[in-house]
Amino acid sequence: MVPYNNKPNEYYLKFTLTDASGEVSGRIWQGVFSLNEIMENGYPYKIKGSVVEFKGSLQINVDDLQKVPYEEVEVEDFIPAGPYTKEQLDKRLRDLIDSLPKSSGLTLLRKIYNNDKIRSAFLTWPAATSVHHNWLGGLCQHSLEVAEMCQFLARSYQLSPSLVTVGALLHDIGKLREYQFTGVAFTLTDEGKLNGHMQLGIEMLLPYLEELDPVDKASIKHIILAHHGKKEWGSPVVPQTPEAFAVFLADYTSAKLIRIQSVLEGVSSGWSEYDRFLETSIFSGNKGSSEDGSLFDVFE
């Protein structure tokens, strides 16, 4: 964190304070250099300060802060819980893997997810630090959504169910190395910033892929490298197999629809505010607009 120069010989710090409920901008105006020495990104602090309004938004001017020991912290206070428990995600993952026909893909997934370190992290990590599935267990939830959509596509379009499931459950596995857990936050690692989760995923999987048929090995690597769909969206290659297209489309759908769900939270009817990630506002419908209800109504 670098102090900003406000006026000659006057400095301040600006940063973002977050917990499970959201985030707010923070500023330090006094003791800038001494407090800057003890501040680290992604760690818990107890702060004293005042809430002020600045340019229409709330801001906390921090007068003092102290680092809080991890044993005094409940992680759920800082990172939102997802809609599913760790146990529910674990069962869904096991059931999905066990549903595959006997194949090298089934053997591969069992070897990877029987690794306790990988499995525990996969069930805990978020899929991102913002935008989509950015909660505890979000990585597993997102991967399961992608895999379940891919299995439907495989049945409908004669794709390999084993290959799309393997690709879906492994496409984001590099995020286990792209992000690190500080105890109260997930932050980008140095290698995550430098190389990204696709490259890191390939590196993680190489020991597991060695026994596969060369074409199967190349196909799994291709799905991982192509799952963003376009080079301008971060994929070094574009999808060139039916299964790679399926994983890309399911990945895109899962990320966009969960973002739309988030944008519509608290919107009872009509339009949401403009969302810069979706690059549009979302229409939620006019619920209960007639005696017969609306197509937008949710019926139990």
Image (cartoon, helix red, strand yellow):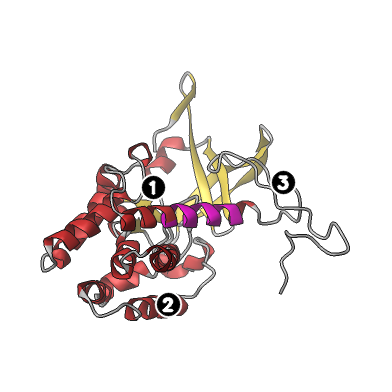
- Disc 2 residue type (three-letter): Arg
Please name the residue shown 56% across and 49% down the image.
23
Image quarter where the C terminus lies is bottom right
Q: Which residue is mark 2?
A: 92
Within 10 Å of disc 1 (Cα), the crowding (few <14, some 14-19, many 20+) is few
Q: Are marks 3 and 1 in contact (CB under 8 Å)?
A: no
Residue range of the region highlighted in magenta in the rendering: 250-261
Dot in front, 3 or 1: 3
**Quarter holding residue 164:** bottom left
Please name the residue shown 24% across and 48% down the image.
191
Q: Earlier in the sequence, mark 2 or mark 3?
A: 2
- Disc 3 residue type (three-letter): Trp
Labelled disc at residue 177: none
- Taking the magenta stretch, the answer to whether it contains residue 259 is yes
Left or right: 178 in relation to 26: left
Residue 57: give x, y in percent of width and height.
66, 39
Within 10 Å of disc 2 (Cα), the crowding (few <14, some 14-19, many 20+) is some
Q: Earlier in the sequence, mark 1 or mark 2?
A: 1
Q: What's the CA distance linking mark 1 and mark 2?
A: 42 Å
Q: Which residue is mark 1?
A: 38
Labelled disc at residue 271: 3
